[in-house]
Every structure is written in C-alpha cells, then in structure tokens.
Image (tube, rainbow, N blue to C red):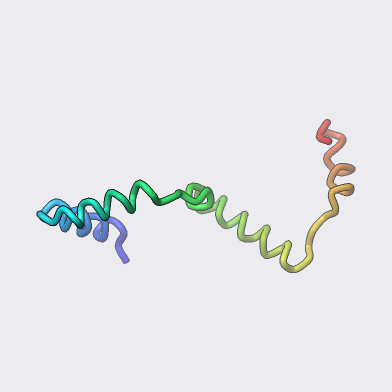
Amino acid sequence: MDLQAEKLSILQTIVNSNDDGLIMDVKAFLSSRKIDWFDELGEEQQKDVLEGLAEADRGETVAHSEAVKLFGKWGLK
C-alpha cells in the first residue's frame, strides 16, 4: 500500500463530496481518535520497545534491586 496515494485518494473523496454526513463523520472520527504513544515513536524506537517486550515475555528481566545496584553508581536510585 502506498500511504501517500491512499491519503491523496481520501482527500480527493472528501474534497469532491457534498455529503454533510461524510464530512461530519470524518471530523468526529479525527477529533475522537486518540494517538497511541507507540505510533509517535520512530521506527528504531518501536523496534526497541518490541524487542524489550519480547525479552520480558521470555523471562529475560532484571530484578529492580539488581537494576539499582547496576545503575546506582551513576546516582540513579
């Protein structure tokens, strides 16, 4: 799917429409749509988050007390 072509097609449909209901539906949808913080991340950041979740699912985690020991030397508590 070519995202730019899809956006242009949607815009063209809206611009050429005389259907008040369509315009109001689009407006209502856009104003009620909540942006997910994940969607605002860059591709690399999304990849890192997904990798971290996969590691946690596999049980590859570090206890909080261990993290404090590891990072405490930098003044993080």
> Residue 51's image quarter?
bottom right
- Residue 48 pos. (x, y %): 62, 54
Going 86% across and 42% down the picture, which residue do you hit?
68
Screen quadrant of the N terminus: bottom left
> With 66 as the anchor, is 11 left or right in this view?
left
58 shown above or below 41: below
57 shown above or below 40: below
- Residue 67 pos. (x, y %): 84, 46
> With 14 as the anchor, is 32 left or right in this view?
right
Q: Residue furthest bottom?
A: 58
Going 20% across and 57% down the picture, which residue do you hit?
22
Going 83% across and 31% down the picture, which residue do you hit?
75
How many numbered marks are there?
0
Report the front residue among 11 and 49.
Answer: 11
Report the front residue among 52 and 30.
Answer: 30
- Residue 54 pos. (x, y %): 67, 65
> With 22 as the anchor, is 33 left or right in this view?
right
Report the front residue among 23 and 7.
Answer: 23
Q: Residue furthest top?
A: 75
5 shown above or below 70: below
Screen quadrant of the C terminus: top right
- Residue 25 pos. (x, y %): 26, 55
